[in-house]
Amino acid sequence: MLDAGRYKANFTRGGLMVPESRIVADLLLAGADANGWRQAIEVDNVLAKRSVSTAATKATLIRGRLKTLPPALWGVIRDGSRPAATHAVLAGVINYSPLFGDFLDLVVRDLYRRFEPVLKPQHWDAYVEDCQGRDAAIPTWAPATELSLRRRVFSMMAEAGYLNGGRRHELTSLQISPEVISALKDAGQHYALRCIQVGSPEETR
């Protein structure tokens, strides 16, 4: 993490990382202790990273995200379909990174409601400026960090299904997997639930 306060630049080191999240979810479900975690990540290299430091960094980030979720979603991430696992991981990213979650909730939701067809870089840039006005703890990030954040956001949104994946970043409707919606409701995770549904057909009518 690069800063304090609500808005943290804590997703520059990785996107959704669904395959890796499946592995980390398995470790969480197995109740791996510190030694078991170290053995799996650093010795056995279950994430198949080129260095121990990279593996440890990715694993710690993913674990932080998944620990914000109810254990029911760990099972969805480990065993569910690719769309369901992706949506569950997305909910964890939203919880862990309100900078991303609030962008969906405040900016992307409005674009859907106004039937705007394209997500533009300016939407993210204006949002960051607004965040700096709302949170005195947020720093003025270096241009390279701001660019990395924007690229990660657009990439995660495309992987989740909010964007069509083309170069124009066209918005598409997105139906979140029912098991993810149910688990978030049961856990009372209203913030993640609200953010994740911004592109659902029910929301965009």
Image (cartoon, helix red, strand yellow):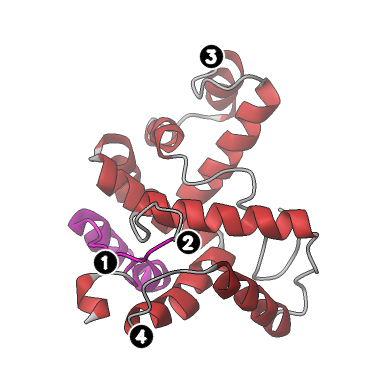
Q: Is residue 168 above or below residue 61?
A: below
Asked if the residue at tag 1 contacts the one at tag 2, i.e. Cβ–Cβ closer than 8 Å, the answer is no
Q: How far is disc 4 from disc 3 in space, using C-alphas?
A: 50 Å
Q: Which residue corresponds to mark 4?
A: 114
Q: Amino acid at mark 3?
A: Asp
Q: Nearer the viewer, mark 4 or mark 3?
A: 4
Question: Where in the figure is residue 31, as x and y percent of width and height?
Answer: 43, 33
Dot 3 falls on a residue whose secondary structure is: loop
Earlier in the chain: of badge 4 and badge 3, it is 3
Question: Where in the figure is residue 57, as x and y percent of width and height?
Answer: 65, 35
Q: How far is disc 2 from disc 3 in space, using C-alphas?
A: 30 Å
Asked which quadrant contains residue 13, the reply is top right
Residue at 47% over, 40% down: 17
Residue at 38% over, 34% down: 22
Asked which quadrant contains residue 189, the reply is bottom left
Q: Which residue corresponds to mark 3?
A: 44
Dot 2 falls on a residue whose secondary structure is: helix
Foreground residue among 151 and 25: 151
Give the residues in magenta: 169-198
Earlier in the chain: of badge 2 and badge 3, it is 3
Asked if the residue at tag 4 contacts the one at tag 2, i.e. Cβ–Cβ closer than 8 Å, the answer is no
Res. 94 mark: 2
Q: Which residue corresponds to mark 1?
A: 173
Question: Where in the figure is residue 160, as x and y percent of width and height?
Answer: 36, 53
Q: Nearer the viewer, mark 2 or mark 4?
A: 4
Foreground residue among 94 and 151: 151
